Image: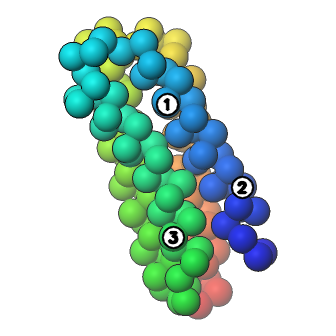
Amino acid sequence: MNSYRDLTVWKAALKLAVNCYSATRGFPNSEVYGMTSQIRRFAASIAANVAEGHGRESTGAFIQFLRTAQGSLKELETHLILCGEVELMVEAEVAGLLGQTDEIGRMLRSMIRSLQQKS
């Protein structure tokens, strides 16, 4: 594997970020520095941490960045659930995005386990 762009988990995380940007376009202007900003930042952070970790010199550093991506994923999930609760998003949209986060979470856990076994 030559590039982080070849990683399935990075591709999935990037797609999630794009979907989060789309989902927040209709948020009220009063949320531009609140939920809109937070959701977009967490979503972008997942793919960015996978990419940064892949570029590090050691497996241990890569694992740590994958764990950071997991943290951003959990923060994103919490904000998405809250958006459903306060009716910034419809439940179907929240459910679709949470389905993506579940899949990415599984991929991250699997990649971490695999890297740990190799080191």
Is residue 116 placed above or below 68 in the rendered structure? below
Amino acid carrying mark 1 in the image: Cys
Q: Which element type, helix, strand or loop, lies under badge 1?
A: helix
What residue sits 36% from the left and 55% below the top?
71
Q: Earlier in the sequence, mark 2 or mark 1?
A: 2
Q: Earlier in the sequence, mark 1 or mark 3?
A: 1
Is residue 113 placed above or below 37 in the rendered structure? below
Question: Mark 2 sits on what residue?
Answer: 8
Is residue 1 placed above or below 119 in the rendered structure? above
State the CA–CA distance, disc 1 to disc 3.
21 Å
State the CA–CA distance, disc 2 to disc 3.
15 Å
The mark total stands at 3
**Of residues 94 and 31, the one drawn nearer to the viewer in this rendering:** 31
What residue sits 47% from the left and 47% below the top?
44
Which labelled disc corresponds to residue 20?
1
Question: Mark 3 sits on what residue?
Answer: 52
Amino acid carrying mark 2 in the image: Thr
State the CA–CA distance, disc 2 to disc 1.
18 Å
